[in-house]
Image: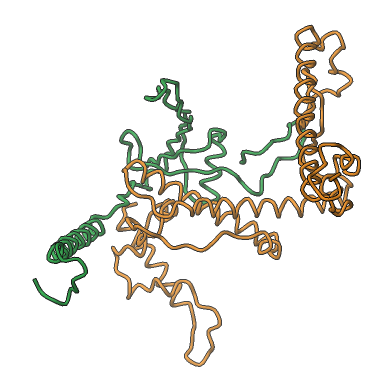
Amino acid sequence: MSTRFYPRYHLGNPQLRVFLPNFVMKLIKPPHPQPPNVATFIVSTQMTKFDIQNYLEKIYKVPVASIKTHIHMGEIKRSKVGGYLIKDDDYKIAYITMPKTETFEFPDLYPTEKEEAMEKEMNQIKLLQKDWSKKIQQHKHRPGMPSWFGA
Amino acid sequence: MSVLRQTRALFSTLATTLSRLHVSHTSVVTTVPAISVFHPLRVGKYTAGIHTSTNLRNLSEFFDDKKNWGEQEVKVGRSWKKDELRIKSNDDLHKLWFVLLKERNMLLTMEHDAKQEYRLFPNPERIDKVEDSMKNLEDVVVERNRAYWMLETGETGERPAGVITDDLGIRRRRQFCQHFIPSWMHHRKKETIHRGAAVCKFQRLMREKNFVTKRRYYRRVRGHVYMLWRRFPNMNVEALQQQYPEVDVRLLRKHKKARGHHLQNEA
């Protein structure tokens, strides 16, 4: 349950117990549409299906019916500058099927209300900037003139 | 069982448990019963306060607090320091580890989604803070474990390591592996150790390279000491020797390179 060194196992050895699991799991939006009771994760490439099941059931208390994993090879591309090869990291993607009673839909993490509020603020700032530049124009050809005087 | 029936069943169990709670107005309630939040009269059937599929709440731990979604800045505290972790008990550290792990998962999930959506991920240093805290926690646990093992057994329980000379003759620090058979059964015969002409040549050149770097270093130190003697002929010799222990400072003082244009040197 960790990326650390595992000692060798011989028949009759005690069960290895890891108290500080090192693995990290990212919940992602599936690249292809999935049924409602399927959640998609990117997990450490060293994780097995048993590891994933224990992790979710014990740490997050998520019931797991079945797991399908595969290691996705990172893209190999050429650099635009220099023409050398670049490879993205490999990652393991896991499709966790939960019991049919459970459903999960990846939420939209960027609510439109906040975005609209931000845009409004930016527009107001732009208007203020315009007004200010216009105001400065009044005394462009009179350096040192106090702004108390009007146009 | 349909969602509606499940909700009704849940409420019925809550109602019965509440009726069993005998809390009189005169008695002092020392513990707040957790069920009081979900009083059936206050909570409707279809509010978001209760989920019949408990899964939703558990997977929502992979996401940040809802009020932080779409924010430009999220304020957080600093990472845990080692001294702060050393005063905690093992149980506390164990619990803290999982808290940090879940937080790390949550932050990485949010970062990944931000990258996919080409959006700003606020305060990415949060991930570094969590990772620092986890590293410090692990270091503290390793300290305690090592101390315990040394007291009980006289050796650390960690993977043994040592300095070995590899096939190219370079001394490296290597962590040892476990084998099914003892070393005298698998130890390589001298004939199979690769020591051909190429390796000999490599070792010769490597030794030369190391010697050259060492020579350059000593020359640099000597040159610096000469310069110091030239500029400051009345230095404290013991202090200078302490600063440059690799060279004999007294010997260098007598060299012509250490002679400066001073009154005592004029004819």
Q: Which residue is drawn at 60% across and 44% down?
A: A22
Q: Please determine whether, in this image, residue B197 is positioned above or below residue B213.
A: above
Query: Which colour is chain A painted?
Result: green
Tally the marks. Answer: 0
Q: Which of A75/A151 is in front?
A: A151
Q: Which residue is drawn at 35% across and 37% down?
A: A30
Q: Which chain is orange?
A: B
Determine if residue A11 is in view: no
Q: Please determine whether, in this image, residue B252 is positioned above or below residue A58.
A: above
Q: Which of B27/B214 is in front?
A: B214
Taking the view exactly as shown, the residue that stands out farthest to the left is A151
Residue B245's image quarter? top right
Residue B100 appears left or right of B213: left
Q: Residue at x 49, y 84 (%)?
A: B23
User: Residue B129, percent across and down?
Assistant: 54, 55
The quarter in which the C terminus of chain A is drawn is bottom left
Taking the view exactly as shown, the residue that stands out farthest to the front is B267
Q: Please determine whether, in this image, residue B208 is positioned above or below residue B267.
A: above
User: Residue B174, percent across and down?
Assistant: 76, 31
Residue B176's image quarter? top right
Residue B58 appears left or right of A136: right
Q: Residue at x 18, y 71 (%)?
A: A145
Residue B95's image quarter? bottom right
Q: Which of A15/B153 is in front?
A: B153
